[in-house]
Amino acid sequence: MAELADRLGLPFANLSLLQQALVHSSYLHEQPAAGESNERLEFLGDSVISLIISERLWREHPGEDEGSLSTRRAAIVSARALAAIAERLELGRYVQLGHGARAAGEEKRASVLAAALEAVVGAVYLEFGLEGARDWLLSVAEEELAGDRALASLKPAKSRLQELGYARSGRPPHYRLVSDEGPPHSRHFVVEVLIDDVVLGRGEGRNRREAETEAAVHALAAFGDGKP
């Protein structure tokens, strides 16, 4: 944890807090003595991230309405975007997983990485306060915040795919559940999305919504991100 704290540029006085942020529930079920999983810190970090990103967008886009700001925020705080930040920080190396989850490569899964980042932000907030959390998060999310993409490109993938489905066939995409496995604390969903009965994308996630979103992203890629 000292190595990770140094990598993150965070002089934690309480390294146990950072360690808890990286304890996946699958590890706790195999090692009950480990104490507590990162789920409570994830809950806290999710709110902290939303507040910090909302404030930043509010300041940087004074002419935009609530809907536009919400679209921008959704793109930055999505599981995919948070996982990209976690990957740059190499958080997957430090997440404590159960043997089965590690063997399945869960440390590379977007949902696991996003949850780990949220938990780390929760720990940073508790250790350094809101100002410290703001400074650190904005620095590691600089790449996501720097791009001033058109709002249309920031629209959620499922919404863009729905528009494409209606334009192509007059019907919305159909999301088909392929599998729903795992214990209650660690579900794993696989979903396919079809247009005109043709499978265009497959996605995975810790809930059906995440899996459908990933499937939509892959389907859009098949269409050149929605271009004819």
Image (tube, rainbow, N blue to C red):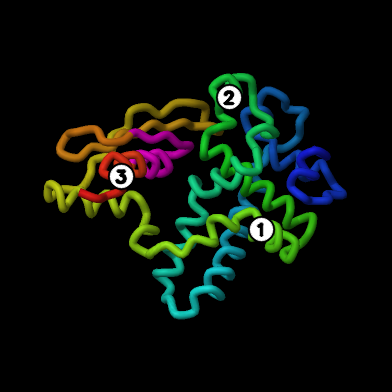
Q: Is residue 203 magenta?
A: yes
Q: Nearer the viewer, mark 2 or mark 3?
A: 3
Q: Which element type, helix, strand or loop, lies under badge 1?
A: helix
Determine the residue positioned at 72% across, 64% down.
130
| The disc label shown at residue 220, or none | 3
Q: Which mark is residue 101?
A: 2
Q: Is residue 135 left or right of residue 161?
A: right
Identify residue type, mark 3.
Answer: Leu
Q: Amino acid at mark 1?
A: Ser
The span from disc 1 to disc 2 (Cα, nearest Å) is: 31 Å
Q: Name the side, left or right, on which 159 lies relative to 82.
A: left
Tag 2: residue type?
Answer: Ala
Residue drawn at 67 percent across, 48 percent down: 41
Residue bounds of the magenta highlight = 202-215
Q: Residue furthest bottom?
A: 63
Q: Residues within 10 Å of mark 1 (few under 14, many from 20)?
A: few
Crowd band around label 2 with a 10 angstrom C-alpha radius: few (<14), some (14–19), many (20+): some
For disc 3, the neighbor class at 10 Å (few under 14, some 14 to 19, many from 20) is many
Q: Quadrant of the N terminus?
A: top right
Residue position marked by numbered label 1 in the rendering: 139
In three-dimensional space, the C-alpha distance between marks 2 and 3, rounded to whole angstroms, equals 29 Å
